[in-house]
Amino acid sequence: MLRWPVTVLLLACALSAQAAPAPAAADDDLGRFVADKGLLGKLDEMRGRISDTTSELVVTAMGFLGVPYRRGGNSAETGFDCSGFVRAMYEQTVGLLLPRRAEQQAAATQPIDQKDLQPGDLVFFNTMRRAFSHVGIYVGGGKFIHSPKPGAEVRVEDMSGSYWQRRFDGARRVLVGTPQATAQQPATHQSP
């Protein structure tokens, strides 16, 4: 059980050692240890898998452009509401079952700074005079994909538009393997 935290600590040290040369001999020993164990190669492999997964997530989401909004909807056949769309995309591409409602998704994910957004991260907005009442998936370039409202369809929007800027509530990253992200929530009230 202690193995993962130690591995993560070693990887973090390896990254910092790789980013800037370390003057101390102890850091050289750590660098040799990391190299001997092949941890940098494993880290590169993990980075590649994460990048592939987020790319697949965004491409999959784009495949649903034009699917109509439907309150409580969570499939292409029935239509999607915002949180149903996000949940379906993560379940289909990552195999991760996020909670059903937007505010639950916000609570189950890691807050990040807007400047740190990466494709696949979640973006939240206050569209109903309450925090985290709307959610979408960041696709890059300041844009996100979402299922916006009744009468509309899944579409890509620019976050720099004044409507979205005024209502931006925060960004979150889905951390694969966290118990909050994998727990199923009852679908008693769906958020648009």
Image (cartoon, helix red, strand yellow):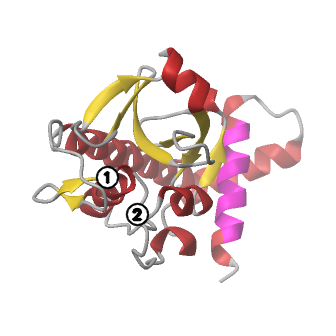
Marking on residue 49: none
Mark 2 Cα within 10 Å, few/some/many (few <14, many 20+)?
some
- In the image, is 70 to the left or to the right of 109? left
- In the image, is 168 to the left or to the right of 96? right
Q: Position of residue 72 (x, y in %)?
A: 31, 62
Taking the magenta stretch, the answer to whether it contains residue 103 is no
Q: Position of residue 177 (x, y in %)?
A: 50, 69
Of residues 179 and 167, which is closer to you in this image?
167
Name the residue carrying label 2: 190
Quadrant of res 15: top right
Q: Amino acid at mark 2?
A: Gln
Q: Amino acid at mark 1?
A: Asp
Real-space Cα separation, disc 1 to disc 2, in angstroms: 8 Å
**Which residue lies at the image location 69% right of the left edge and 69% below the top edge?**
5
Residue 32 visible (yes or no) = yes
**What range of the chain is rendered magenta?**
5-17
First along the sequence among labels 1 and 2: 1
Name the residue carrying label 1: 81
